[in-house]
Amino acid sequence: FQAEDGIRDSVNGLVGSEMCIRDRQGTFLLTVLLAVVAIMLVPGGRFANVTANLRRAPGPSLGLGLVAATFGFVVALLLMAVLILTVIGVPLALLVFLALMLVAVLAVGVCGAAIGGKLCGMMGQDCRAPWLAAVVGMTGLHMVSFLGALAGLSGAEAMATPLTILGAAIKSLAFLFGLGAIALSRLGTRETA
């Protein structure tokens, strides 16, 4: 299909894959913004403990992240379902959902900060601010997905689909590493030896 043949978005005049790439990049920017805000709200020493934990113990972080994601989120979803069924608990279910989203964004931010610190060091720069390291790292984590979106936009679907799947897998692993590091450090209150 050519752009003229498609149904255009009434606001921006975008077609199919153009809307998709706009939405994906918008979601990425929103996630980075939320991660920066969350990182700035976490006391600096705690965030440093979590990222140091991830750097020192990536294997256990991944394993615990997988367990926490599997069982923790199932328990949280069941809790939300029970709260919603009681009707009175709907506001509490909303708070549980928001807490889950905050943990998810913070987990990816933790992994992004660990990767961003390494990337800055490799480029001879110093990302002292944890939020800056997180932005650099999260941008690096998103690069494969961005290339997949660009490939789809240019019509190279044979490359777009694998890149998009690989990008989703990379971000899922980043989430698991970050979640495990948060849990291993007991929310940043404990440094690893």
Image (cartoon, rainbow, N blue to C red):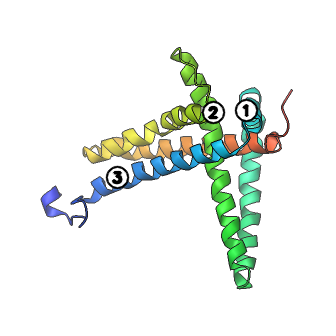
Q: Can you tell which mark lies on residue 22?
A: 3
Of residues 106 and 151, the one drawn nearer to the viewer in this rendering: 106
* Image-quadrant location for residue 184: top right
Q: Is residue 86 visible?
A: yes
Q: Secondary structure at mark 2?
A: helix
Q: Can you tell which mark lies on residue 173?
A: none
Of residues 190 and 76, the one drawn nearer to the viewer in this rendering: 190
Q: Are marks 2 and 1 in contact (CB under 8 Å)?
A: yes
Task: Give the Cα distance between marks 3 and 1.
Answer: 33 Å
In this picture, is 88 found above or below 99?
Answer: below
The residue at which mark 1 appears reads as 48
In the displayed structure, does residue 160 sit left or right of residue 97? left
The residue at which mark 2 appears reads as 130
For marks 2 and 3, the one nearer the N-term is 3
Q: Secondary structure at mark 1?
A: helix
Count the marks: 3
The residue depicted at 64 percent of the width and 42 percent of the height is: 40
